Each structure stands twice: as C-alpha cells, then as structure tokens.
Image (spheres, rainbow, N blue to C red):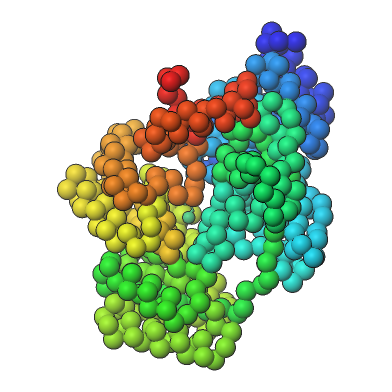
Amino acid sequence: MGAELTDLDFIRRVRGICGQKNVLTGTADLEFFGSDRTRLATPAPLAVAFPGTTEQVVDLVRLAASAGRSVVPSGGRTGLSGGAMALRGELVIAMDRMNTIKAFDAINQSVVCQAGVVTAQLQAYARDRGLFYPVDFAASGSSQIGGNIATNAGGIRVIRYGMTRQWVSGVKLVTGGGDVLDLNRGLTKNNTGYDLRHLVVGSEGTLGIVVEATMQLTTSPPPSSVVCLALAKLDAVMEVSRAFKASSSLSAFEFFSEAAMKAVVASGETRPFDTIAPFYVLLELDADTESRVDAAFNCFERCVREAWVMDGVISQSGEQAARLWRLREGISEALAPLQPYKNDLSVTPSQVPVFLAEVEEVCRSHYPDFSLVWYGHIGDGNLHLNVLKPEQLTAAAFHERCNEANEKIYQIVQSLGGSVSAEHGVGLLKRGALARTSTPPELAILRHIKSAFDPSGIMNPGKIMPTIPDS
Ligand code: S2G
Ligand code: ZN
C-alpha cells in the first residue's frame, strides 16, 4: 500500500477498522482529542479513532506504519507536558471506548483493566471490594490508567505508596511495529531478563500504545487525619517533616506558598485559620488509635514551641479533612486561568530548602517581575514551580523569559542531582531538557530502544526524545 494513500483514503481505511461512527474528523473534535492540558499550540490531527479492541489498535498501527502516518495515543488528556498533543496531521488513537475492568483476582489482589479505565473508576472498584488503589491526584476523575502508566503518574501519597510503576504487575502493549507484547502477566517474581514492562511505564506513548494492564491493589489505609500548618520560614519545613516522621505514620506531606493559598481561597475555598504565613504544609497521618491522635497533637504543640509553626489545624472529621485537602488539590485548577508557566522539578527531600532558596535567589535577582507560586509533594522532593505572567509582558515574551530562566533553574536542579521532570513527563515541553540531563551514551541507548519498539518512528513523534542530530 505504501505512503501513496491520500488523507481521505487513509481516513476511509481507519473507518473500515473502527467503524464509521468511531472516527471523528470535525474541527472541534480534532482540537479536543488532539490536546491535553498543556494547550501548547492549536492541535491539528488528521482524525481521531476510537478502537474497541486490541485487534483494532493493532490494525490501526499497522495501517499507519504502512501509510507512513504518525500516531498519537490519547487517554484522559490531563497531561501537562504536551505528551498527548497532536500538531501535525497525526492519527489520534483515543482509548476512551476500551474502558472496562475485565477481571479481579482476590487472592492476587489484582485487577485487569483496559487502558481507558478512569483512575477514579479503579479506585471505586477497589473500595467496593474492601481494597485500595493508592495512586491519587487532582486529575484522577478524568485521567485513564493507560495514560497513568504512560506517564508513571505520582500524586499525593507517593511517600507511602510510590508511583504508578509500583502498582503495574502486567502491561499489554501494541508496539509501533504492530506487535502485541503481554509483559510480566501479573507476576510478582519474574527474573527472566530485561523487564520490558518497566520500560513501557513512563514511555509516554513513544514505544507503543498500552491497551490493557494488570494493576495491583492493597489493603485499605487506617482512618487518618489531615494537618495543615502555617510555617514561619522555609527551612522549618524540614524540621516539621523530621518531627512528624518521627512521631506519626505519614501518608502524605505536601507544601504550598501563600501565593497558592491566595489563589485557592480566591477560587472559593476557606482559609484553615486566620494566620497568613509565607508557607504551609499539609500532611496526612494515621489516626486510628488514641495514642496516634495524641502523638499528632503533641508533635504539633512541639512545632509551635520550637517556633517552626505559627498556627495549624488537625481535622476532626472526614468533611474537614476533605476541605483541607481541597486547599492543596485545588491549586492547579485555581491557577489555570492565569496561564502560569509550569515547572515540575525534584531533588532529594533533604535538599529542598537549598533548592528553594537558590531558585528564589535567581528569580529575585534576574526576574524580579516574576511572581512565583510554589506547591507540591515536598515529602518526596517534588515541587511544582508555577510562574505567573507579569501584566506588562506578552505571552510570547513571557515564555521566552521563562525559557531563559529555565537555563538557570535547570542548572541548580542538576547541581543538586535533581530531575527537570519529576512526575509530569517530558512530552513536547521538556524535550530539550533531556539532551541536557542525559549523557550522549544514554541518549544513544534511548534511541536504540525507541527504534526497537517503533521501527518506523510513528509512535508519538517529537515527544520525549530530543531532536538531536544522528550521533
Ligand atoms: C499537583 C497537578 C498539576 C499541576 O497539583 O500536584 O501535579 O498543575 C500537580 O502542576
Ligand atoms: Zn503533582
């Protein structure tokens, strides 16, 4: 067949695979399904296909490869690095129709999900069976398991439960070559050479399309309390972290600045106390026994005595806990209308104060007109630095200044051995960074891996891999 297919011929064949009504070509659909939350540029895919089976995904990928067309996998479209953006006539393969939970194994505590299962759907499925799927974040109501695997989603309880990677015991992938790999098949122990499952986790649709996964569940957590504290100064964060880690069993340790608090309160949430402080931490800890509740109060009182904490509140009900969580989880949405420039950085937890201080210093001296909004999962060293556009700057000039500032910020991150993309992935947004953070031998290996899975280079082209000249 070769690459002589016209756009119309190609779309006709796509329809022949998925069915007429499961292929969209209208402008609004192309924009919606060709995008994620990055809104980097106007999406411009050729068409959006909604396969219903793995076989249809295989046929679509093989058709695209033979016609020399590129493919962009699309899940919940909640990504923040442009990983699901289709900008140049690609075929978007949206997994929304492949959204059933196929099997549950109570002994293995595992669930076989199709890629289009929504994260919150899996969380509820686990809860209904007295179990718990622990990966959680603000977008879990619309993100899909396939996309969570493709980006190794993290979220708010990583310090206790890790990232999505820890919960994937099997992945079924349609490679860019149109082969179906059934990886690890739910096994706990399987030392038979390289674990390709783990290569797929975090590959952002550049090696193939996740069509199905075996996800592990765990026992439900004990009742917990949520604590929100006002901090007098930045390095108090580590003291508070040390104190609560020593006296309580933490499941979350989050952080945000007064600028973030202001944004969330402006969006309708209520301040947890009257004190206005430069920084806040929000932590979640087990509170299933009298002694654990006492330990939390005693630790809080100690933090106040030590003048690390200016004020605080410990939730007394599930409703109050949910309200406190909304202060943290509502930040991203509250900032969205301001179209911030987003960074998603990580260092080891003990280096956070140095990291924060150095980045603040660089911005204060070189970009005094930038207003910085800090928030994130400080317990695992991951901070989301959002920069708000100064009034007087156009969006283009602002982005240019931010990219320039990134040079300095990334140097700080690298000097501390950190990562320039902690949990949101590389996608389109941070491709250039990979050329900086990976050595030439590493990049060469990454390119060989990419070509092994995707020999025609049709899978999500332009994502993750820096466009470096052939080495
Ligand atoms: C968070 C959500 C996305 C964002 O709030 O932890 O990962 O806006 C983020 O950074
Ligand atoms: Zn986050």
User: Can you tell which quarter of the image residue 133 is in?
Assistant: bottom right
Q: Is 453 left or right of 275, judged from the image as shown?
A: right
User: Can you tell which quarter of the image residue 318 is in?
Assistant: bottom right
Task: Evaluate whether residue 202 shows in this view.
Answer: yes
**Total number of numbered discs in the rendering:** 0
Of all residues, the one furthest to the top in this rendering is 4
User: Can you tell which quarter of the image residue 287 is in?
Assistant: bottom right
- Residue 236 against residue 457 in the figure, above or below: below
Measured from the top left, where is residue 264 in percent x and y? 43, 62
Can you say which quadrant of the picture contains the N terminus? top right
Task: Evaluate whether residue 34 shows in this view.
Answer: no
In the depicted view, which residue is nearer to us: 300 or 242? 242
- Residue 69 against residue 254 in the figure, above or below: above
Measured from the top left, where is residue 21 in percent x and y? 80, 31
Can you say which quadrant of the picture contains the C terminus? top left
Q: Is 194 left or right of 240, judged from the image as shown?
A: right
Of all residues, the one furthest to the front in this rendering is 192
- Residue 209 against residue 61 in the figure, above or below: below
Q: Is 410 left or right of 107, judged from the image as shown?
A: left
User: Residue placed at 49% from the left, 73% from the top?
Assistant: 250
User: Residue placed at 31% from the left, 83% from the top?
Assistant: 304
Measured from the top left, where is residue 249 in percent x and y? 51, 77
In the depicted view, which residue is nearer to us: 422 or 307? 422
Q: Is 427 left or right of 416, judged from the image as shown?
A: right
User: Residue placed at 61% from the left, 49% from the top?
Assistant: 148
- Residue 331 against residue 456 in the figure, above or below: below
Measured from the top left, where is residue 185 in percent x and y? 75, 48
